[in-house]
Image (tube, rainbow, N blue to C red):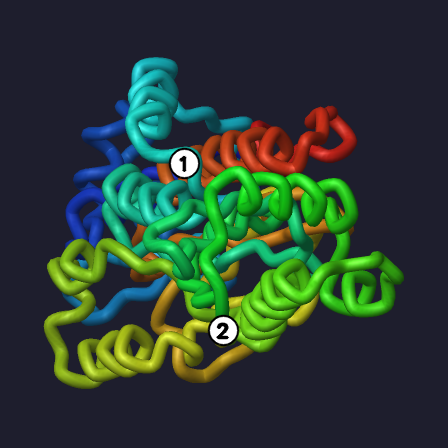
Amino acid sequence: MLPPRTETILKSIVGRYIVNAVPVPSQSILHDYGLRVSSATIRNEMARLEREGYIIRPHTSAGSIPSDLGYRYYVESLEDVELPLNQQHLVEHMFHQVETKLEEWLRLTATLLAHLANNMAVVFIPRPVKCQFKHIEMVSLQDNTALLILVLQGAKVRQQLITFEQPVLQPELTAISSKLNNNYASLDVHQISGKEVELSDIEKQVANHILGIMQAEDEEDRDEPYLDGLHFILGQPEFTGSRQRLTLVELVENRNSLKAILPHKLPLHGVQVVIGKENESEIIRDYSVVLSRYGLPDEAVGTIAVIGPTRMPYSRSIAAIDYLAWLLSRMIARLYGKEATSQTDFGKN
């Protein structure tokens, strides 16, 4: 730990640089904190911080900026941060305005997180270990054509047209749906395939359509994330250079490369902050990443993250990630018919 006065000076440098993005001179620190010391003392403390690697002086005549180590000290010294109540209420209101569909929630999460953190937000989709059947409905469209509506665990809805060899009326479609719902609820593809159920030819046709949809879901790319806020990060002064911009374009255009932001060992609970060169992937070592798991442990877990310059507003990003991870986890628990508890919750401190 740094001595109290040295720590105060470091926090002043980090705080000012986060807001203004210009090197911080000693006079500004003296003015900000009203420390009862001379400017020479401030300069001596800053020289110590530079020697110990917490700050950098880009030019000998200019002020100082934080290093990755300085940002790390600043982040570790942050006390519990929470999203302001008015923003919590606004976020909940926004979620109540969209459909009860996981895809809509994740898309909205990316948008809200980008605006709250003023940086780029990435939301990785939570997936069950295996795709699970929840229920079906069938709607008669013509004499021998019906719309199959398949709802999977996690509120994913898939639709497919079925053409029968003979006319099938709505009452029969309803009866088929009821029978399959009773037999297949909460089962995965292998369990449905292996379950011995006496089915008519029409029921087998419907069951085969269900299996085909579920197999396609299991084979789908699981890492395609939702992304928002690119314009926020491109507006940061750090990214006016062509190299940084090209890195961002590469991340966005090839969204699978966004997996590079995920540490190999991401804790199951809590918000993690990875700063600059702490990132495992070379491609994002100009950035900081704030991220958290969300969902249901052992059933369906995703990740939400903020990507920005190392000069990001950490307290704001941590608070937004923490609250959204908690809210999403609660909502997903309800989709799965589970009760969220303090043991299963992600986020919310």
Residue in the picture at 51% in, 60% down = 274
Place of residue 22 in the rendered image (x, y in percent of width and height, measured from the top left): 15, 55
In the image, 125 versus 63, the foreground residue is 125
CA gap, disc 2 and disc 1:
21 Å
Q: How crowded is mark 2: few (under 14 residues within 10 Å), some or many (20 or more)?
A: some
The mark found on residue 51 in the picture is none
Classify 319 as above or below 253: above
Residue that mark 2 sits on: 259
Depth check, mark 2 against mark 1: the one in front is 2
Does residue 107 appear anywhere in the picture?
A: yes
Residue in the picture at 19% in, 49% down = 25
Classify 37 as above or below 306: above
Secondary element at image label 2? helix
Place of residue 143 in the rendered image (x, y in percent of width and height, measured from the top left): 38, 55
Does residue 6 appear anywhere in the picture?
A: no
In the image, 339 versus 110, the foreground residue is 339
The quarter of the rendered structure image containing the C terminus is top right
> Is residue 87 toward the left or the right of residue 23 in the image?
right
Q: Quadrant of residue 67?
A: bottom left
Mark 1: which amino acid? Ala
Question: Which badge, 2 or 1, comes first in the chain's sequence?
Answer: 2
In the image, 212 versus 285, the foreground residue is 212
Place of residue 272 in the rendered image (x, y in percent of width and height, measured from the top left): 57, 51
Residue in the picture at 74% in, 50% down = 184
The mark found on residue 320 in the picture is 1
Q: How crowded is mark 1: few (under 14 residues within 10 Å), some or many (20 or more)?
A: many
Mark 2: which amino acid? Lys
In the image, 2 versus 126, the foreground residue is 126
CB atoms at circles 2 and 1 under 8 Å apart? no
Q: Quadrant of residue 15?
A: top left
The quarter of the rendered structure image containing the N terminus is top right
Secondary element at image label 1? helix
